[in-house]
Amino acid sequence: MAGSRTSLHKWLTAIFLISRTEQGTNAVALSKIISVTYKTAWLILHKIRHAISTADQRTLLSGIVQVNSAVYGKPYNPYYRNHPQEHYLLAGSSLSIQGEPSYIKLKLVPKIHVKKSFFNAPRHWISPNNI
């Protein structure tokens, strides 16, 4: 936000919208809501998402950690892997004492790091001592 010609009010409105919407916010909608050009809205979204990503990298999962692998995208065919529209994900969560997720992370796994058998395996339970 430092050095930006966009007013602080518009930045804070963008941060609020990004953090509070269930379905996400895109640059077209944001540009209409805060009355800026598409290019400015895209840049604001890019900078806010980068800041969120950087903060997320600093927060480690702790306690009892549950990790599950998944494939996202179309078309999914269990006999044919590495389709260009399929994306490999790891979902991890820290569990509270009651067994409820207290912090969740989703990470995209580059296809070069994927072993076929790993994404066909059942859930993996990892304790912090094994990481």
Image: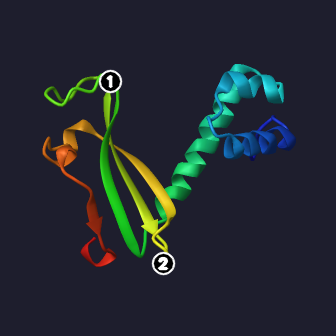
Q: Check disc 1 and report the residue beneath it.
A: 85
Foreground: disc 1 or disc 2: 2
Residue shown at 71%/45% (left/top)?
Answer: 20
Residue 100 position, x and y percent, is 49, 66
Name the secondary structure under disc 1: loop
| Horizontal arrangement in the rendering, residue 102 relative to residue 66 (left or right) | right
Q: Is residue 44 above or below residue 62?
A: above
Q: Is residue 9 above or below residue 34?
A: below
| Horizontal arrangement in the rendering, residue 85 relative to residue 33 (left or right) | left
**Depth order, front residue of 92/79:** 79
Residue 27 position, x and y percent, is 66, 26
Residue 115 position, x and y percent, is 15, 44
* Quadrant of res 127: bottom left
Q: Are marks 1 and 2 in contact (CB under 8 Å)?
A: no
Residue 16 position, x and y percent, is 76, 45
* Quadrant of res 108: top left
**What's the residue type where badge 2 is placed?**
Ile
Q: Which mark is residue 97?
A: 2
Residue shown at 33%/58% (left/top)?
Answer: 67
Residue shown at 28%/71% (left/top)?
Answer: 131
Which residue reaches farthest front?
98
